[in-house]
Image (tube, rainbow, N blue to C red):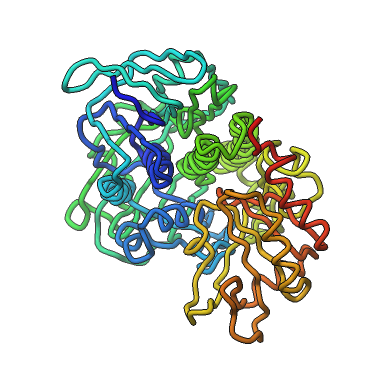
Amino acid sequence: MTDVDVLVVGQGVVGQFASLLLARHGHRVLAVERHAQPYALPRAVHYDPDVNRMLAGLGIGAEEQATFSEPAASYDWLNADGRLLLSFPAPLDGEQGWPESTMFSQADLEASLRRQQGRTPTLETRWGTSLTAISQDGDRVTATLVGPDGTAEVRASYVIGCDGANSTVRDLVGIQIQDLDFSSDWLVMDLKMPPRVWTPENGQICDPKRPTSSVSGGPGRRRFEFMLMPGEDAATFSTEENAWRLVEPWGVDPAHAELERLAMYTFHAHCATTWHVGRVFIAGDAAHRMPPFFGRGMVSGARDAMNLTWKIDLVMRGLADEHLLDTYSTERHAHVQYALGMSIELGRVICETDPEKVAARDAHLLARGPLPWNALPPMPPEMLGPGFFPGGEAGADPVAARGGQQHPLLGPDDRVALLDEVAFAEFTILVDRRRLSAEDAAAIRSATPAGLPAKIIEVEPVDAQRPTVHSGVDVTGRYGALFDAIDRAVIVYRPDFHGYGSAVSLDEALTLVGGLSASGSLQKG
């Protein structure tokens, strides 16, 4: 019998992230995938900057990312006449130190992650290996695996099911899926072709006769998605002959493009009712599926992996009580509800085919757009649900539960770096040196729980003298702008890039960082 710390089932992007994030902390991880070979064709094509950060933290930096991805400057919606209805801008220098939106080739990204897996000594990956049974006995999980060498049993402290929409892990532990009553059928066509100018570069054609998506699929690739209309036969619609006919208006033909993949998809909106049973967890498509119109499908799975793995790490190192793991479901379920809701609502707008409703939609957006904050109803903030925050709720704190920021800092070695280069997957405590002294920062450092993976970084203003070993100069002024905007002297970020909380004064800061052990349920017992 094999004994490991964590068994990860499924080796798509989410499973790869989960296994690598845990193994980099030294935990023994077994990753299994039922397919004998990696899936070599495109699937997801978009990710957010937290995925850039995860990749970089795992050793896949900007240069390697550029081999399979390219930034998207905007996401544009056009009407049937080609007029711009909405434009969602995506700055190239976003608040997390990376482009706000990136288009990519999933097969190439997974290949990069597999190379990292091969370099990770505490991680074993078995291909062509399926999970058939799970049992739990309090402090361990026993899993039955069937692979090329026959049947074997594995004992693990935790199991993470990243095994897709038809998850075996989810079924074996009896987790139910809620159908959110949105679906539509689309033909997805992935092409390899030379670079050229596209209008839109990445966007939607909101044509009631045939809603269409046209986006980058990463360098040298293009994706088209065409909605199946009422009364059309899916088998006829999905032939190669028809697909080439659909892309003719774009100036695309077989002589100048290679068909990489052609498939009919039914876009669904589903979400699990709970995300763990005992020591067994689910993540990614096993926990949720959403239409592609908000670009949060794979991103949400990556966020699941980042949220769960730092918590498992702390529990296994004896730095946290197991109750911390309960916050995975409560935090991520609420966060995913936002992504699901946005995906569904955007999809309803894009997929509208009623001529009167389309005319009203276009008239409104042409009059109020193209900036979405002028043309669309106010959107609630994107936040984690109740969980690991002071008091268990985000409350009125301007940082807690929200996505964090990172900006360049000049260090004492005269090198400019982002936070992740020194504090990836750790707590990060930022101290505004305009408001608090070096002695105050030292007191915060002393109050931080012993053994907690954390960096306390003093942020010096742009005109400061040479930084110390504990500080960095805010070379762009963006940290100063953040401190000023929220009127705080201290910001605490969690290992998953989300805010834990903030403080105005030294006394508040000491209470805040002390709570990482006491009120935050990190302390065992």
453 to the left or right of 443 = left
Q: Is residue 298 above or below residue 256?
A: above
Residue at horizontal 49 percent and vertical 58 percent from the top: 101
Total numbered labels: 0
Q: In front here: 154 or 223? A: 154
Residue closer to the observer: 437 or 254:
437
**Whether residue 152 can be seen here:** yes
- Expressed as whole percent of the image width and height from the top left, the position of residue 364 reads 69, 52
How far from the left and from the top, in percent, is residue 18?
A: 42, 39
The part of the image, by quadrant, that contains residue 257 is: bottom left
Pick the residue in front: 54 or 285.
54
Q: Considering the image in quadrants, where does the N terminus appear?
A: top left
Q: Position of residue 293 (x, y in %)?
A: 52, 44
- 366 vs 165, left or right, is right
Residue 509: quadrant of the picture = bottom right
Q: Is residue 287 left or right of residue 198?
A: right
Query: To which quarter of the image does residue 355 belong?
Result: top right
Quarter of the image that includes the C terminus: top right
Q: Is residue 81 visible?
A: no
Depth order, front residue of 425/272: 425
Residue shown at 32%/48% (left/top)?
113
Give the image location of residue 486, x and y in percent.
77, 63
